[in-house]
Image: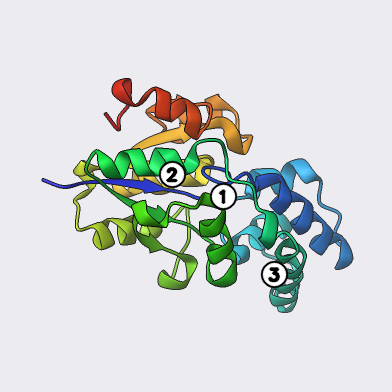
Amino acid sequence: MQRAAVFDVDGTLVDTNHLHVTTWWEALRQAGHRVPMHAVHRAIGLGSDDLVAHLLGDDRDKDQDDELSTAHKALYGQYFDRLPALQDAGRLLRRLDQDGWRVVLATSAGGAELSALRRAIDADDAIMATASADDVEEGKPSPEPVEHALELAGVPAERAVFVGDTVWDMRAGSRAGVRCVGVLCGGIPRTDLVEAGAQAIYDDPAHLLTSLADSPLA
């Protein structure tokens, strides 16, 4: 029976979380909102609408949401030509593909941003499919992105592992019924990932690659 290895992208395979923190902080600042960077960091991994709601609350001026998202996209888009893949991210995906795993990405990115991330990873030959923000109605921590990834892979939840770097990833994977693996390269503490559902923790893709034999992806 086939197995699926589902991966978050930002902060898991590509070193972009702090770029997102800075560009969201700047978009919020330009709109007159003072939100500390540590709070923005904790919200990274949510889709744009959910991130704004999480940071500004339900009593915000919701008519401003689209402007904030557009400003963030414009600021973050300046980095599209130099997004840095984390060490051995591409090698990890190719190794899993060679080992018979169906590799699927599950990300809140879409469009040109997703294309830039895939260029950074440079492992399209190992990626079977991508479940992006364009494909689902609700983003993480809803299980929908992970469930859609499993549909694309044609693999049941009990035959899948989801790798991510945020509590939103771990909650989404847990709600989808898959085993969850956390990585620390997104900057979220180990304890937070474990409490959110991570069954194993690794430093980054390179650490997971060297530890595959003893991991949930063995």
Give the crowd class for mark 2: few <14, some 14-19, many >=20 residues within 10 Å: many
Answer few, some or many: residues within 10 Å of disc 3's Cα (few below 14, many 20 plus, some between 14 and 19). some
Task: Check disc 3 and report its element: helix, strand or loop.
Answer: helix
As shown in the figure, which amino acid type bears the numbered disc 3?
Answer: Ser
Q: CA distance from mark 3 to mark 2?
A: 24 Å
- Residue labelled with disc 1: 10
Q: Which three-letter amino acid code belongs to the residue tagged 1? A: Asp
Residue at (58% x, 70% y) in the render: 112
Q: Secondary structure at mark 2?
A: helix
In the image, taking residue 51 as reference, residue 207 lies left or right, namely left
| Residue at (75, 64) in percent of width and height | 78
Q: Is residue 126 left or right of residue 26?
A: left
The CA distance from mark 1 to mark 3 is: 17 Å
Percent coordinates x, y for residue 152 in the rendering: 27, 62
Taking the image as drawn, is residue 169 in sight?
A: yes
C-beta proximity under 8 Å, tags 1 and 2: no
Name the image quarter holding residue 23: bottom right
Indicate the amino acid at tag 2.
Arg
Seen from this angle, which residue lies furthest left?
A: 1
Residue 178: tell me if it is visible.
Answer: no
Q: How is the image coloured?
A: rainbow
Locate residue 109, reporting x and y percent: 54, 62
- Taking the spot 52% from the left edge, 44% from the top edge, the residue there is 13
Residue, disc 3: 69
Q: How far is the residue under mark 1 from the one under mark 2?
A: 16 Å
